[in-house]
Amino acid sequence: MAFFILNTMKILGIESSCDETAASVYTDSGLLSNVISSQEIHKAFGGVVPELASRAHDDIIADIVAKALERANLTIDDIDAIAVTQGPGLMGALLVGMCFAKGLALQSGKPIIGVNHIDAHMYANFIENKPKFPCVSLVVSGGHTQLTLVEGPFKHTLLGKTRDDAAGEAFDKTGKILGLPYPAGPEMDKIAKEGNPKAFSFPRAMIKDGLDFSFSGLKTAVLYHVRDHAGENLDVYLKENLPDLSASISEAITDVLVKKLERAAIEHKVPDILISGGVSANSMLREKAKKMAKKRGFSLHIPSLAYCTDNAAMIAVTGFMKAQAGLYDDLDMRPFARYAL
Ligand code: KG4
Ligand code: ZN
């Protein structure tokens, strides 16, 4: 009897661009481990404090990577390449992940692969499924709102982006006006389920024009609405109207997102459409996108909830695809805080 040893590729992914420290191992046979630690320290400040984020990453990154290897039942010697988030993100936070990855690569002699965090959100859709190219991708996160035509692996053309706030920021900033803790998106999602999305009409900026987005007007409209309706009794007004306000705001944001995704997919005649990033965890967005895809006959891909918000599985799978395409980096690669396609 003949035995064949399959030569599998094993990629360690490391993510530290914002306030999650994460590591994961992805191979030909799928995900072997996915470890994540979310920094709680920022809650008291109503947003991520960069200096605190860097320090918290540094405290825990060695443990997180060790756990990811352990849960995959592997050592660094078994790994074929180390993929690490290169940007965009907080510079200090990125440097912690990148310096750790470079040290590990130097010590183990393994190659290193820099991964674009926004691309990685999109490729999170390849962890559990294999969407077909060409496809149209909508990435909606705390810092980015981006529609792209993806003709093949790493062949991306920008179709539209936000001109001001990102979709996640729209949830977080309007949620702050409603008194919700940062980040407000997940909480608003929960509360919106109890409310009437047609209770209040908030603006859907640029819904009829092109493929760019604009969410800053929504934030101002919510601010004026609350000021004009609450008067002296802000707490009482918010208590009584929180579900309807949350549902109406969510409706305004998700209407625009789904409409633009639909328009882009029709214009580019693609059968597959992808949504990803933290906001893709939003239940109203998932429902609306499902309905639209069914009506238009698109094949819709949205990652499972664990792969929507920041994680390292998406870095590992993107690293895997880059390794397959021969896209390796050198130890002199640098992190980047900002990114323009
Ligand atoms: O992708 P992500 O984890 O980090 C960035 O790369 O920015 O996205 C975080 C964003 C935050 O703005 C958060 O409020 C939003 O995703 N978010 C949600 C939900 N879960 C996370 N927004 C709406 N509904 C959700 N269920
Ligand atoms: Zn992200």
Image (cartoon, helix red, strand yellow):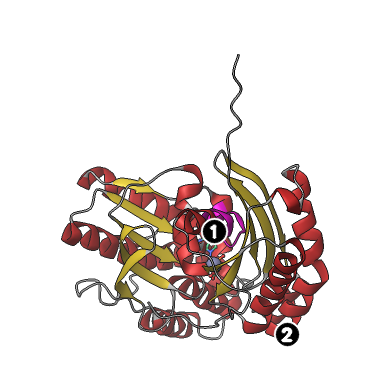
Is residue 203 in view from this perspective?
no
Please state which of the two labelled residues, at mark 1 or mark 2, is closer to the viewer: 1
- Whether 89 is drawn above or below 83: the answer is below
- The boundaries of the magenta stretch are 307-317
Q: Indicate whether residue 316 is drawn in magenta.
A: yes
SS at mark 2?
Answer: helix
Task: Tell me, yes or no, whether the highlighted magenta stretch contains residue 166.
Answer: no
Residue in front for this viewpoint, 93 or 198: 93
Amino acid type of the residue tagged 2 in the rendering = Glu
Residue at 27 percent across and 65 percent down: it is 260
Q: Find residue 319 and name its label.
A: 1
Name which residue type carries label 1.
Gly
Based on the displayed image, in which of its 4 quarters is residue 64 positioned?
bottom right
First along the sequence among labels 1 and 2: 2
Where does label 2 land, which residue?
A: 51
Other residues around mark 1 within 10 Å, as few (<14) / some (14–19) / many (≥20) = many
Query: Measured from the top left, where is residue 91 in percent x and y?
Result: 62, 83
- Residue 43 relative to residue 340: left or right: right
Label 1 near ligand 2 (CB < 8 Å): no
Query: Does 68 sit left or right of 166 as displayed?
Result: right
